[in-house]
Amino acid sequence: MMWRNVWAVIRREYLQRVRSRWFVAATVGGPIFMAALFIVPAYFAGQSDRDARDLAIVDGTNVLYERVAPKLEDAGWTVFEERWRADVVTELRLAAAEGTIGGFVLLDELTLETGEAILYASSRPSTVRQFSMRSSIARAALEYQLEQRGVDVAAMLQGGELRVELLSGAGSDMEDPQFAVAYLGAFFLYMVILLYAVSVMRATLEEKTNRIVEVIISSMKPWHLMLGKILGVGAVSMTQMGIWLGTGVLLVATGFPMLIAARPEMANLSELRDVLPGFGLLSLFVGFFVFGFFMYSGLYAAVGAMCNSDEEAQQAQIPVMMLLIVPIVMITGVIEDPNSTLAVGLSLFPLFTPILMWGRVASGVVPAWEVALSFVLMLVAIFAIAWVAGRIYRVGILMAGKRPTLPELWRWVREA
Amino acid sequence: MNDNGFAIRLRGVTKRFGKHTAVDSFDFDVPRGSICGLLGPNGSGKTTSIRMIMGILLPDEGSVSLFGADPDLSRRTKVGYLPEERGVYRKMKCLEFITFLGEIRGVRRAEGRRRGGEWLERLGLAEWADKRVEDLSKGMQQKVQFIGTVIHEPELLILDEPFSGLDPINQDVLEEIVRDFHARGTTILFSTHLMDQAERLCERVCLISSSRKVLDADLRELKAAERRGVVAVEFEGPDGWLHGSEIERVEPVAGGLNLFLRDGADHQPILERAVASGARILRFDLVEPRLHEIFVRHAGADAVGDAGVPGVSGAEAGP
């Protein structure tokens, strides 16, 4: 009987939300928006100067073409080689005038020494394209020169590599530190935890203000109603995140390669894969979200239960929201120095853990036992919050009139 | 189950909000199978009493028992409770809403949908089943909510102001349904400030005023005991017989006069005098006291306040 009640509440909450226009818009719109954010610029980059894209390369050095061609192809041109001969310039001028080619580039000994080259074109390419062509050619020349001296040019130009050997021997199998992922992930966690926890508060408040709660409470325990609400909204959040993550993975894993195969000029999309978090980090992200949601939704449910109007709730939720804002304020410091005593201590405080511990694992090396401990502490916090919030909820949900003061709240918790 | 014949029993129930006493040492019984009206003006403590019966509020003093025991969850689920402040899930479809209310009281979904469909049909809302509750008029929402109240076929119906907000036609429909439930043995307690309604429906009435119980009795017995003092007459001819020591005052009403007799006075001499005077008597009718009048007599006119019925008009006295 009890579980059937809770199940009925979960089911209602879930279906009601998943069917709403807002949910469909956010769930479908989110990935589309994100994909557009990456695809549109790539598309435009490939699209512009389209008519001037077919380029003849006249290589007077005989060593540059093989190095320049792939770089220019990457930058969106289609190139082919013309042998050097006496009247090649005249011929190519004619072809360009007829429109069969977009223009041609002359490379000679001077190019090898200074990186200087000449582009004959019917119209001036955009500054960006000029720049990419210039640097492609200069880079090719540099590579050639360095290779002559036996330098591993590719590795050098990648920016080298710094291998960190830990003296203590401690370590973890976390992925490479990723600054941007740590930051963006922390903000995303803050947003989604707040979003869904506030949903629980609104749902509670709505039931309370329209008095339907009187009917429901006459058939089930307040605690079960609260549990059903939280699990229902939680299921909605998991659905939404699942769809987001799923389409994200699908897009990066298969969508982008397909797109690149179809339109080579969008090749720069593939670089995105290198900065995205891997499976281990994603799982931790979901874990931090779920635990964070259960802690905060309990708090928000209690806030909703003790208020009588939206305005009141806006005010009453401020202390709870501060608990989420504090770690966001501290995230920069924690990411910069993830293993300082302060960072370790704060990230183990359960209400700060989702955001701060995420910042640490995503930006540095955190011992596995610390991560495990933080989850245990969050679990303890979830039960503690459920106990306290459940009592506040039980009294508050049927209470009309003035919002309780702190001493009154404490009495509710003790006496309920 | 310790039955003892009462669906609801309150003993010495008192509820205070701050300095205000909302309900003051209230004793109240609702026998199983009866249909009871809890009457009183707005703010007299009806809703507070009902909330205590439903366990929404806890009494400061006294005891509440439901089906002879504590009003715990297992007993409360056998009650169909329609609160005074109408609450619905506005975004839900009507039938889903009704099904949900059944589900949390142990009615399986398929069964709930079937019953809900039948009820919607019966109340003329069949084509609204898949519409959102918020798309319905207020009266229709109220009907949907009523269906939600009875979907689990409760043993006891507690309806707080069920008729307010309904047009006369729908009031009649609802009255009919309430009678139906009564005929099938369901115990019914409803609160109202409309004396007419109570007079038509109730077997028992409990009058409260200013947080205190004024009367609690079987309606028929009450009326018999309270029958006194008003005679409705219609006549042609001389009217000199209207002057007599028995008659306190005379009040013209539609189609005749109401004669208010002094306490303890007999109506027989008046009739004899009238006949002797040669007046042609078309009607000489001992008027049953109306509930409103009884209430005023016991609680005082001030207490009735906005109780919603104009003064005595014997010519259209109830059944």
Image (cartoon, rainbow, N blue to C red):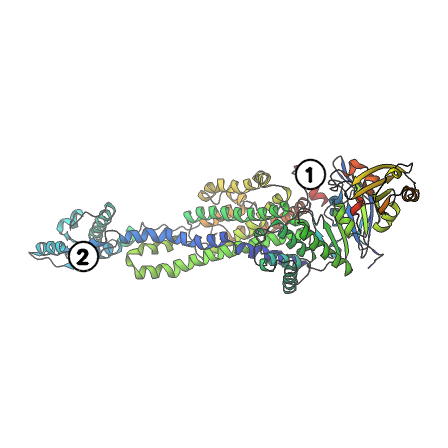
Please state which of residues B147 and A413 is positioned toward the viewer in this rendering: B147
Q: Residue at x 66, y 59 (%)?
A: B102
Q: Position of residue A49 (x, y in %)?
A: 23, 51
* Residue B33 picture quarter: bottom right
Placement of B259 over or under A87, stated as above or below:
above
Q: Is residue A398 left or right of residue A115?
A: right
Locate the N terminus of chain A and report the quarter of the image it occupies: bottom right
Earlier in the chain: of badge 1 and badge 2, it is: 2
Chain containing the residue with disc 2: A
Report the residue marked by disc 1.
Answer: A408
Please state which of residues A387 and B191 is positioned toward the viewer in this rendering: B191
Q: Can marks 1 and 2 be said to lie on one chain?
A: yes
Which SS class for mark 1?
helix
Report the residue marked by disc 2.
Answer: A65
Q: Residues within 10 Å of mark 2 (few under 14, many from 20)?
A: many
Q: Marks 1 and 2: CB-CB under 8 Å?
A: no
Q: Position of residue B225 (x, y in %)?
A: 88, 47
Chain containing the residue with disc 1: A
> Total marks drawn?
2
